[in-house]
Amino acid sequence: MLNIAPVSLPLDQPDTSADLDDWEDLKELFLKAQEHYDADEYDEALPILRGVIHEAHRFLKAYNDPSSLFAVPETPASSPSTPSAHSWSQDLKHRPKSSEKSKSSSEVPTAFHTLLGTTLLLFGIIIAQEPSLAMPGEIKAPVPYWIAALATFETGDNVPARTQSASSSLEFPTDWRLAVMWGRTLVCLADEILNREHAKDSQSLQLQPDKKIKQYRLDHPAWPSDSIFALINSRRPLSNPIDLATTPPIELLHLSTDLFARGILHMPHQCHRPGSPGSRSRCSPVASTNAVTANSSRKSPPTPSRRHSRTIPFHHLSFSRMREIYHIATSVLIVSEKLSTPAERKTWATQADSLFAQMKVEMLKTSTLFGAGDVEKMRGRCWLVVGSAELEIIEKDLERDGDGMDIDEAVFDSPVAKSARNGLTKAVDFLSKSRSLALEVPTTGAEDVVTVSQTSLQETCGLLGEALLSLANVTKNEEERERLYAQSAEVLGKDLLSDDVNMDGV
């Protein structure tokens, strides 16, 4: 029976043993939760994620290091010299006999920690968007779950079976999924830091140490000693837990970039789940409102039977390379829009665009994962951030004063203005293409298909109108500038010239 008790409670079951059959059951349970998550069925996904967490707790109670479940009998070091290595070798000796079939296991040693860390990441994302779904006794904030996910990924990255493989004949493939999900967790935390900085009480939080201490305690609660979270913390490598009040979001973005690079490098190019539905780009809690909904203009196809999960290693389970890169790029873009300085926004929006660019055009044409023009829209949004960041640097020089004095035309010829025009021109090109592709979508069919398609088109038109208006403001030729103003008004569906908008300034 699925255990859906609050995740902060201790394990309430006498059986704390676990073997490979239990692992296969856990994979199937996770896949079921992911299917509901991808379909935005939060109320269905969250109870199953709770069940995954409770089952994972059983594995942690049964093994000091669950990676021993997948290991061959040979130990990675003949004389374990560290406590973790000693625990690993002891787990090998005491694992159930049924686990001897691990000799032919294709799982990577980090598979368990990747599954648990991903579960905690998704659990936190759902809580961030729907706090009311939390059960009594569960924390209604995402950060504690994301911090537990970080600790889980760090532990998995340091399991003896992986770190000591160089001293033995064992070789394991790189767990690309662990790197990607670890990076996504860091981006979620960077997003949370920026949200707090933008909050109205951010200044008072910085000035009053007692509020900073209170917030740290909320982010790092005192979990019950027999809860899974206390167990995760007790086994994490020796490192200081992250403090969101003192950690710059840029630092987390740099760390995530390294992890994303590792994950994408080792991510297989073939799609192991070709019929998989697209999902909302929820790499950060706000993505559901600020990001495009992948595959929003069509019904999701049925997913394959979960019994296939027993024949596929976890790091290949439920996988689409394009979808993973799309989620990574979208999460970086969303955070880039919130960064404080123009230079930072330009840098990370450019980084996001480079990720979107990795999605081959020929693959997109045959993909069922994305709606018409979705990727072009996101690339246009990237370049709008880049161009707007450059424009912000010179905006005061582009403003006319109250006496109607002309703008110094030398401003238009400056390197910053040229860079702004380049970025905004690219934004217009991508958004125009996205708009054209969206207009080609048939307007007949189910009612929800038409509604979602029109919403996506309106988003694209809003971005395109903004890009045209910004490009006009940094255009030197007056005739061309007026043409861009008129085009912007046409796209937005209103006469901007009749509004109280100063078309000669920013």
Image (cartoon, rainbow, N blue to C red):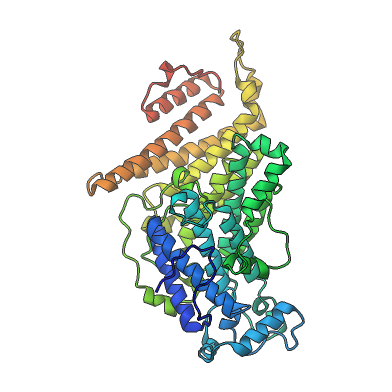
- Please say if 419 is above or below 351: above
Outermost residue, right direction? 81
Q: Which of 402 and 239 is in front in this view?
A: 239
Q: In which quarter of the image is residue 453?
A: top left
Within the image, what quadrant is residue 92 found in?
A: bottom right
Is residue 244 at all visible to an observer of this figure?
no
Q: Position of residue 499 (x, y in %)?
A: 43, 18
Report if residue 286 is visible in the image. Answer: yes
**In the rendered image, which quarter contains the C terminus?**
top right
Q: Which residue is drawn at 45% across and 36% down?
A: 463
Specify the farthest residue to the top: 403
Relative to 225, does residue 341 appear above or below in the rendering?
Answer: above
Q: What is the tally of numbered marks visible in this picture?
A: 0
Tell me residue 438's x, y (percent): 35, 44
Q: What x and y, as percent, mark residue 180?
A: 56, 62
Say which residue appears at 46% left-offset and 26% top-offset. Answer: 484
- Residue at 58%, 62% (x, y): give it: 149
- Quarter of the rendering occupied by the N terminus: bottom left
Q: Is residue 22 left or right of residue 149?
A: left
User: In the picture provided, is 438 more to the left or to the right than 204?
Assistant: left
Q: Nearer the viewer, residue 285 or 477?
A: 285
Q: Which of 295 and 79 is in front in this view?
A: 79
Question: Where does residue 491 sit, x and y in percent of width and height?
Answer: 39, 30
- Seen at 55% across and 77% down, the residue is 59
Say which of 434 and 25 sits in front: 25
Residue 216 vs 266, above or below: the answer is above
